[in-house]
Image (cartoon, rainbow, N blue to C red):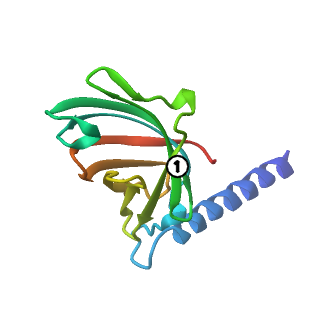
Amino acid sequence: MKRVGLLAIGIGVLVSAGLLLSQEVAAGDDGTPKCSNATLKGRYLFAASATLFPPAFGITEQSVGAAAGYHLFDGNGHGKDYVTFVINGVVQLLASSGTPGPVPLTYHVNQDCTGFYTVDVPGGPKFDIFVSPDGESLSAINTEGASVATYGPDRRVAAR
């Protein structure tokens, strides 16, 4: 019985040391989190509504839009969005049909866990992003393009 108790204490010490070391790797000398492109890796679900302004998506008057899908970040500054997008109740892009397929994106995450991503299509929007230090979630706001949209926090649901 004494051995079992000592074994449990030993395992507890090792787990605690591992947790402390993993937090130090992700933090700077002053204890602040350190992020990079590698912080965002995997699949993140998202959903957002937006107000659209001409000439976004060929509209001629202010409109409403909504999108849902997932980001797939590769950890190296590139990724893809799989998205269904609706404007004024009309489906513009339907991810489930695979047409036109995933939308490419590029992204950058600064050491302070802020950054941006850009949808790599002509006139595609740019978003400022705010990433959790462990990379498990992010929030975004549209900063370029003819729309006003925010979303998040989006949670990582898979490592790939």
Q: Residue at x 13, y 33 (%)?
A: 61
User: Residue 159's spot in the image, x, y percent?
Assistant: 63, 48
Q: Is residue 37 above or below residue 142?
A: below
Q: Quadrant of the N terminus?
A: top right
Q: Is residue 29 above or below residue 79?
A: below
**Residue sitting farthest toward the left:** 61
Which residue type carries mark 1?
Answer: Lys
Q: Secondary structure at mark 1?
A: strand
User: Residue 66's spot in the image, x, y percent?
Assistant: 32, 30
Q: Residue at x 53, y 43 (%)?
A: 102
Q: Is residue 142 left or right of residue 75?
A: left
User: Residue 27's spot in the image, x, y percent?
Assistant: 47, 70
**144 or 48, which is in the foreground?**
144
Q: Is residue 150 above or below residue 67?
A: below
The answer to which image quadrant residue 76 occupies is bottom right
Q: Residue at x 57, y 33 (%)?
A: 98
Q: Residue at x 45, y 66 (%)?
A: 35
User: Residue 37's spot in the image, x, y percent?
Assistant: 50, 65
Q: Is residue 76 left or right of residue 51?
A: right
Mark 1, other Cα within 10 Å: few <14 / some 14–19 / many ≥20: some
Q: Which residue is mark 1?
A: 80
**43 or 121, which is in the foreground?**
121
Q: Is residue 69 left or right of residue 43?
A: left
Q: Is residue 103 above or below residue 50?
A: below
